[in-house]
Image (tube, rainbow, N blue to C red):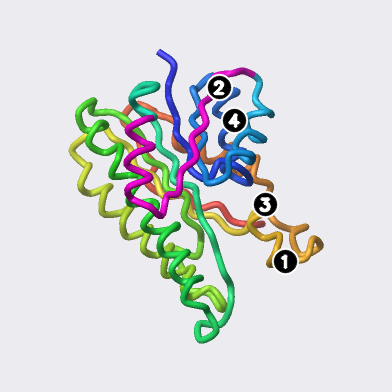
Amino acid sequence: MQKHVVISGAGSGLGAALARKYNEQNFHVTLTGRTQEKLERTASTFNNSNYSIYTMDVSSYSDVEKVFEKIVSDLKPIDILINNAGVGFFELAENLKTEQIDQMIDINLKGTIYCSQQVIGSMKQHNSGSIINITSTAGIQGKINESAYCASKFGVRGFTESIINELSDTNIHVHAIYMSGMDTPFWDTILESDQKSDMMNPDDVAELIITNTALRKNLSVPEVIIENH
C-alpha cells in the first residue's frame, strides 16, 4: 500500500526538500503550511500527482484539529508526520519583542505538540507510524541571540523525549532531528547571501533524515544530529 506522509511548513526550505524526496519515493505527500501559493510551488516540482495541499496554522489548535480531521477523512491514516514548521527571531534576550517570543513558542513548540496529538491515537490503534520532529542544534545548546528560539527548541526536545518514553511499548517510531544552519529562506532576512555560502544544502539534509528514519526491523534511531562541516 502507498504510504502517506504529512509535512508541516512544506512551502519552502527543508519541508519542500523532504516533500520532493518522499514524492520521488512514491509516498502520498500531504503538504501543509500557511500559504497556499508556496505549497503549490513545492508541488509543481513533483514528478507525479500523488500529493494533497491543505493550508493550516499550526499555532491554532482548532485549525490543526479541523485540518487533520479533513486530511484523514479525505485521504487515509497518516503513516509519517513531520513537524517541520518553524520560525526564528534572533536578538539579545532583553530586546526580543513579545510578539516574536509568542510566535516562536506558538509555532515551534505548541505547533509540534498540537500536530503530534492528532496522530498519536490513530498510530496507537494501528500500532505503527512515525513522528519526525525537526528541531535544531538550538535544542541542544544555548546560543547568543537565540534565547527564546532555543527555549522553544529545548521544549520540542523535552516533548519528543517524553513521547518516545510514552510510546516505548508500541511499534511507533519517534525521531528528533537536530541540525545546524541550512541555506534556506529561513535566513533570508537575517543573513547576507555570502554568510549563507557555508551552510548545508536542504536536499542533503532531507536525504539524511529520510535514510535515518526509514523503518528497519528491530532498529530505531531516536536522535539524528546533522552539523555543518
Mark 4 or mark 1, which is nearer to you? 1
- In space, the residues marked 3 and 1 are separated at their CA atoms by 11 Å
Q: Secondary structure beneath disc 4?
A: helix
Q: Is residue 113 magenta?
A: no
Residue range corresponding to the magenta coloring: 48-70
Report the amino acid beneath label 1. Answer: Leu
Residue 221: image quadrant is top left
Mark 3 in CB contact with mark 1 (< 8 angstroms): no
- In space, the residues marked 4 and 2 are separated at their CA atoms by 6 Å
- In space, the residues marked 3 and 4 are separated at their CA atoms by 16 Å
Image quadrant holding the C terminus, namely bottom right
Q: Residue furthest bottom?
A: 94
Of the numbered discs 3 and 4, the one sitting upstream in the chain is: 4
- In space, the residues marked 2 and 1 are separated at their CA atoms by 33 Å
Query: Mark 2 packing: few (<14 Cα in 10 Å), some, or many (20+)?
Result: few
Report the amino acid beneath label 2. Answer: Gln
Residue 130 placement (x, y as % from top left): 36, 35
Residue 213: image quadrant is top left
Q: Which residue is mark 4?
A: 21
Of the numbered discs 3 and 1, the one sitting upstream in the chain is: 3
Mark 2 or mark 1, which is nearer to you? 1
Image quadrant holding the N terminus, namely top left
- Mark identifier at residue 191: 1
Q: Residue at x 50, y 22 (%)?
A: 27
Q: Secondary structure beneath disc 1?
A: loop
Of the numbered discs 2 and 3, the one sitting upstream in the chain is: 2
Q: Secondary structure beneath disc 3?
A: loop
